[in-house]
Structure formats: structure tokens, C-alpha cells
Image: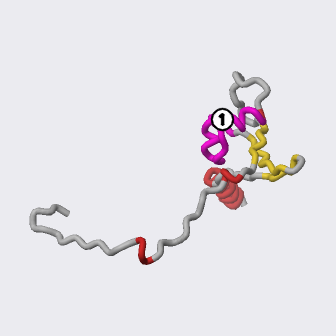
Amino acid sequence: MFRYIIICLFLFCGFQAIAQEQDTLFVIKKGLNLDLKYYVKAGETLPMLANRFYVPGETLEKMNLSNPNRKLQQGDLLFIPILKSNFSSIRPPLVSDEYRELFYKVAEKDDI
């Protein structure tokens, strides 16, 4: 019985150690706009989050920080606007006129 308890305890601790933290985002509606509700994690900065969510830093600062000199703390709640700029643009595939095949003959002096 003791061996069974030790094995269960070991498995439980092992799974807890390898479990990854999930990044859960909630969308809320503020008037006509949609915003992401995001809690700041340790070590995150405003420019880091602006790059991550493709939002201008000034927009994040204006929406969330009443005092611009205040640093973000772990657990702070930020509202991140969902804008057209949040999404990367998808380019259509190339048409056959826009590309051509490229061949290169490997010479003896080439080092591969």
C-alpha cells in the first residue's frame, strides 16, 4: 500500500512539473469594439505585448495605463483592442508569370 501511495505521489508531482501554463484569452465587447482581456505575466512589458498582439504601443498605453510612468505588474489586467492591424496579411499564391525556374550547376571548386 505504501508503495502504491509513493508511486501515485510521484506521478502526480511529475505531471505537475511538466504541465505547461495555458494562455487563455477572453474577448469582451466594449460598445462597438471587441477587446481581448489579458492578464500580464511576470517579466512582460508593454512593448513586448504590443509586438505580440500587433497593436501600436501608444494604443495599448492609452487604453490601459492611467499613469504612463507606471510599470506593468504580474496579474495586471489589460484590454487589447482587436483591430485590422492585429492580423497578418495573407498574400495570394504567385501566378506562373511571376516566377521562373532557377538552375545552378555546382562547380568543382564549390564547397557544399
Q: Nearer the viewer, residue 112 or 3?
A: 112
Which residue in the rendered view is the most extreme toward the front? 97
**Is 108 a magenta residue?**
no
Q: Which residues are magenta?
A: 41-63
- Residue 85 vs residue 62: left or right? left
Q: Main secondary structure of the magenta part?
A: helix
**Is 55 a magenta residue?**
yes
Q: Nearer the viewer, residue 87 or 21?
A: 87
Q: Quadrant of the C terminus?
A: bottom left
Which residue in the rendered view is the most extreme toward the bottom? 96
Q: Quadrant of the N terminus?
A: bottom right
Above-or-below relation of 70 to 48: above
Above-or-below relation of 16 to 50: below
Identified at 74% across, 53% down, the residue is: 24
Which residue in the rendered view is the most extreme toward the left? 108
- Residue 106 vs residue 4: left or right? left
The three-letter code of the residue at mark 1 reads: Leu
Q: Nearer the viewer, residue 97 or 105?
A: 97
Label 1 Cα crowd, 10 Å radius (few <14 / some 14-19 / many 20+): some
Could you say where residue 89 lies in the image, as x and y percent from the top left? Answer: 60, 59
Q: Which residue is mark 1?
A: 46
Could you say where residue 71 lies in the image, as x and y percent from the top left? Answer: 69, 26
Is residue 79 something one can see in this rendering?
yes
- The colour scheme of the drawn protein is secondary structure
Q: Nearer the viewer, residue 78 or 1?
A: 78
Could you say where residue 101 lies in the image, as x and y percent from the top left? Answer: 32, 75
Identified at 87% across, 51% down, the residue is: 32
Identified at 74% across, 50% down, the residue is: 82
